[in-house]
Image (cartoon, rainbow, N blue to C red):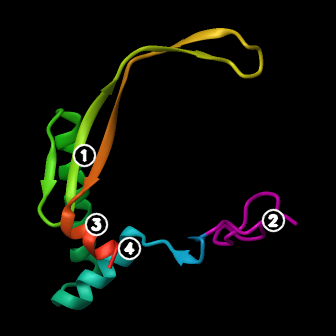
Amino acid sequence: MLAETPDDKRDPVGREFPRHHEGKTMTTTNEIAEKIATEHGLTKVQSKAVVEAVFAAVTAAATSGAETSIPGFGKFKVKDTPEREARNPATGATIKVAAAKKLSFAPAKALKDALNG
């Protein structure tokens, strides 16, 4: 069964896209913005702009190689991964994987404590 409408939450085969993992629902930027708007007397447009500005600031810091530290939440840090050799599982051929940068996140102690009760 194919999706009939663009807002249908189904893939081309007709399966529903998962919106949760192990019974937990995902939080989206819109949901975060709505919560901020409600709690701080802002419009949804204003709060969405704030949320997007935070993500843009983290992105800008990461692309410049800087670390972003948010006290009580954690640190976003750029790490270099060196060039390496890997195998193509289909052919068994050895290939080179180029060096790259990745963004890592280390949660702060307060966030770890909140997660673990």
Q: Distance between the residues labelled 2 and 3?
A: 38 Å
Q: What element carries label 1?
A: helix
Q: How far apart are marks 1 and 2 (CA)?
A: 35 Å
Q: Which residue is drawn at 26% across and 90% down?
A: 38
Pointer 1 residue: 59
In the depicted view, which residue is nearer to us: 75 or 41? 75
Say whether disc 4 or disc 2 marks the residue closer to the N-terminus: 2
Task: Select label 1 or label 3 by which is in front.
Answer: 3
Which quadrant does the C terminus fall into? Answer: bottom left
Residue 75 pos. (x, y %): 20, 51
Count of marks overlaid on the render? 4
Asked if the residues shown at circle 1 and circle 3 are in contact, with their CB atoms under 8 angstroms apart, the answer is no
Residue 36 pos. (x, y %): 24, 81
Q: What element carries label 4?
A: helix
Q: Distance between the residues labelled 4 and 3?
A: 25 Å
In the depicted view, which residue is nearer to us: 48 or 86? 86
Against 70, residue 80 (above or below) is: above
Q: To which quarter of the image does residue 55 belong?
A: bottom left
Label annotation for residue 30: 4
Is 98 left or right of 112, judged from the image as shown? Answer: right
Q: Which residue is drawn at 32% across and 40% down?
A: 103
Label annotation for residue 112: 3
